[in-house]
Amino acid sequence: MNKRIQLTIIGPFLSLVFGLMSASVSAEEITIKAGELRLNAVLNVATDAINEGPLVLLVHGTLAHNGMEIITNLQALLADESLNSLAINLSLGIDDRHGAYDCAVPHEHRHEDAVAEIATWVEWLKGQGVDQILVAGHSRGGGQVAAYSQNADANVLGQVLIAPSTWNPEYVKTAYYSRYQKRLADLIDVAKQQPSSGWMPEPTDFIYCNKAPKVRAASFLSYYQPAQTLNTPDLLVEGGLHTVILAGSEDQVVKDLPQQLELLEFLNVEFILVDGADHYFRDLYADDIVEAMVDAIVTLNEADQS
């Protein structure tokens, strides 16, 4: 495997590489339509225009939002490097969704819905003249970015996956029973018995939500018996999009990620283990993520020019 465990500190030189010098950052919320839903995102422009230089598209984790500490920190640090960014809110089936998902709201979202929404935002960015996009996601968002990147737009330079989700059916069953004292297989059987657009017949323990009042059967199956694996390493494509994966040495959420990546020998995949970081890369550890993003952008632009 082509691994570089130590980061190269080149962030301070990014402005010189791209000629991007800006004294201020413009931040605004963007709202666009996707079918019947409105999608929103926070756009940070650290250059003179959105289409000046590369842009990083950020995707949050499970039932989260673009105001999470890790996302806002990354946008601020990217602006320090004169890099524009777009932090999206996945709709999770809710029109113009903001903030953390309320478990009392009916769950009609599916894990795979994120792929289409990421693609919608990439198209919007292209419409704004952005022709260099780095897609990045945290936790489940990292896995969703990896799924999108299997058929990424030509304007996407590469992907950065931050503690991306791992998934093992046996572990999921054990974890579900440990959390809810119920056999997951029984709930999967119930979900399969419902009509294609039907609801689970009673309040259902779902993801982080204890006895969520309403859950679509298709939503339950999407997260617990998916058609495509939710294990990020299995979504990586040899010779595909340039990929940087970061994991924290103290991460207790995706503890098996480093071991799985040791088995890969893809030249287009770089793995960075950040000593001391947990799942959320709090405080100064967010700098390590941005340095990896900067490194990826510079490397890809140099390769494109050679």
Image (tube, grey):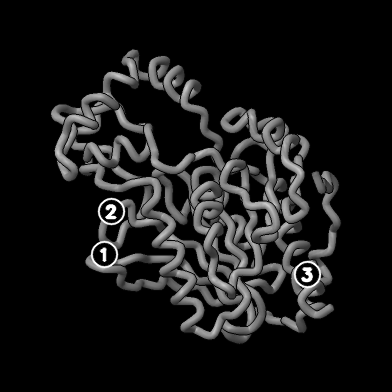
How far apart marks 3 and 1 lie (CA) works out to 36 Å
CB contact under 8 Å: marks 2 and 1:
yes
Of mark 3 and mark 2, the one earlier in the sequence is 2
201 shown above or below 128:
above
How far apart marks 3 and 2 lie (CA) works out to 36 Å
Is residue 16 shown to the viewer in this render?
A: no
Give the residue type at disc 2. Answer: Gly
Residue hosting label 2: 93
Residue hosting label 3: 298
Of mark 3 and mark 1, the one earlier in the sequence is 1
**Residue shown at 76%/76% (left/top)?**
304
Residue hosting label 1: 37
95 shown above or below 69:
below
Of mark 2 and mark 1, the one earlier in the sequence is 1
**Residue shown at 68%/48% (left/top)?**
245
Image side of residue 21 versus residue 230, left or right: right
Image side of residue 177 versus residue 7, left or right: left
Q: Position of residue 70 (x, y in %)?
A: 57, 50
265 shown above or below 237:
above
Q: Position of residue 251 (x, y in %)?
A: 64, 32
Q: Residues within 10 Å of mark 3 (few under 14, many from 20)?
A: some
As helix, strand or loop, the secondary structure at mark 3 comes to helix
As helix, strand or loop, the secondary structure at mark 2 comes to loop
As helix, strand or loop, the secondary structure at mark 1 comes to strand
Q: Nearer the viewer, residue 50 or 176?
A: 176
How far apart marks 2 and 1 lie (CA) works out to 8 Å
Q: Position of residue 223 (x, y in %)?
A: 38, 37
